[in-house]
Amino acid sequence: MIREATAADLPLVRELWGEFEAEIPDEPWRPPDDDAEALEQAVAEGTVLLAEDETGAVGLAAARRRERLVFLMVLYVRPRARRRGVAHALVSELVSTQTGDAEMLELAVLASNEAARAVYERWGLRPVELILGAPLAELGRRLAAPVGPTFGSIHVQTDDAGAVERAVEKALPRLGRSAGTSVTGPANGWVAVHDELCDRDPDVLRRLAKELSYALPAVTVALGLEQGAVVRYNLFDRGGAVDEYLSVPEFYGALPPGDVVALGSNPTVVARLTGADARRVREVARTARSAAELPPALELLRQVADVMGVSGADHGYEGGA
């Protein structure tokens, strides 16, 4: 049975609310809510519902009206009455009894409460506002991180430097060619390409590497240092992207777990296409949650270049990473 709570039910309403907070505690850094006055007002407005069975109260829904909005402050069902449709019945009754200008129902749910979120999404509720948080110490470290140099280079697996130079001549005008471009090599079976603009723009560098891989066709590697803190490579074969590595996958922000994994080096692919030793690739091209957990970025760049057999990836840069 679903019924409207009265002033005489306030002790019971507070008891159920307390059980909810004990079972689904808020994040530890947040101060406790002072809900006493809000509960009293909600009861007076007739927006608090109780679910009861033969044993007594088993569920609570408490809401507040805010002009066109009905805000569901709490929805709780005691463990013994779960999986019997009590929560569904409480919200259904709450919705059906709204009159006047009420148009929307909103509620707050902890990101960690996945079971409740799944139910609400099934009912058709969608995110309206996201509250984001981060530990101050971690945020301070990220914001204070110095911005260092960004540079990169492209390495084409061929001995035909002339063919690479001709392909570069065709591709660069579309990408915004700069004054300084050089094609050097071959060395160890690789021809290196450096361009003043592309080397300092990782996105353009990757586009040029992909175009060269397609046009020649050949295996190409775009390899570089970003913001003096992370190492990235992109490996292409005949124009197709076959592997990507970023030493700190979430350096630029949080990613889904699958994307984090995808930014880890694939030693088997690297070994097959570059002739590198897969074991050494696995040892060198590691990922971490922060740059501090890895070798200095410039040193790591040189190690990755060495294991692939390419040279000049550091542009002769001697500063600290």
Image (tube, rainbow, N blue to C red):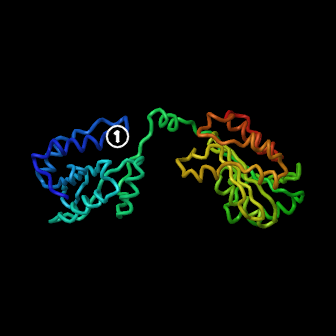
Viewer-nearest residue: 102 or 39: 39
* Relative to 144, 74 lies left or right: left
Q: Quadrant of the C terminus?
A: top right
Viewer-nearest residue: 45 or 84: 84
The residue singled out by tag 1 in the image is 25
* Relative to 118, 178 lies left or right: right
Q: Can you give x and y, in whole percent of width and height, for residue 314 in the image?
A: 75, 42
Res 314 seen here: no
Q: Can you give x and y, in whole percent of width and height, for residue 90 in the image?
A: 24, 58
Against 210, residue 25 (above or below) is above
Q: Which image quadrant for residue 298? A: top right
Q: Can you give x and y, in whole percent of width and height, for residue 48 in the image?
A: 18, 53
Res 243 seen here: yes
Q: Which image quadrant for residue 302? A: top right
Identify the element where label 1 is drawn: loop
Viewer-nearest residue: 42 or 286: 42
Q: Please name the residue shown 66% across and 35% down the image.
A: 294
Q: Quadrant of the N terminus?
A: bottom left
Q: Which image quadrant for residue 248? A: top right
Q: Can you give x and y, in whole percent of width and height, for residue 116 in the image?
A: 37, 53
Tell me the kind of residue under disc 1. Answer: Pro
Q: Please name the residue shown 64% across and 40% down the image.
A: 228
Q: Please name the residue shown 72% across and 43% down the image.
A: 285
Q: Residues within 10 Å of mark 1 (few under 14, many from 20)?
A: few
